Amino acid sequence: MAQRDGRSETLDTLVEKVRVRRRDIRSTLTVLHGQGMLDVLHMRLTLSGFAIGSALIGKTLPALRPAPRASTAAA
């Protein structure tokens, strides 16, 4: 969204928006950069990263971690 609007995100704004640990955001950005989907030096999506991101707008992605199980007390 930010790139379409002509804005760029920073590590700090991503941490604030996503509410994930800084270390996790940084490692994800490194992976995306390595896969050629993000130019991490300019914090801009590449053409392939932009195409994939645009295709996922409005889609519900699966959870990264399973939901915690509710504990039940044995009678």
Image (tube, rainbow, N blue to C red):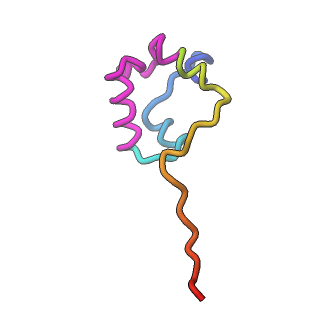
Is residue 12 visible in the rendered image? The answer is yes
Q: Where is residue 62 in the image (x, y as percent from the top left)?
A: 56, 41
Residue 43 lies, in percent from the top left, at: 43, 22
Query: Which residue is nearer to you in this view: 14 or 56?
Result: 56
Relative to 47, say whether 34 is above or below.
below
State the quadrant of the N terminus: top right
72 w.r.t. 27: above or below: below
Residue 37 part of the magenta-drawn span = yes
Expressed as whole percent of the image width and height from the top left, the position of residue 55 reads 60, 20
Looking at the image, the residue that sits furthest to the front is: 75
| Residue in view at x 63 percent, y 36 percent | 60
Determine whether 5 is above or below 19 in the image. Answer: above
Q: Residue at x 60, y 89 (%)?
A: 75
Locate residue 32 relative to residue 50 in the image: left or right.
left
**Residue that sits furthest to the top in the current view:** 47
| Numbered marks: total | 0
Residue in the picture at 49% in, 45% down: 64
Q: Can residue 42 be seen in this view?
A: no
- Residue placed furthest toward the bottom: 75
Name the image quarter holding residue 61.
Answer: top right
Seen from the viewer's position, the closer of residues 48 and 20 is 48
Give the residues drawn in magenta, as a range.
23-50
Instruction: Report which quarter residue 28 is drawn in.
Output: top left
What residue is shown at x 53% (from left), y 41% (from top)? 18
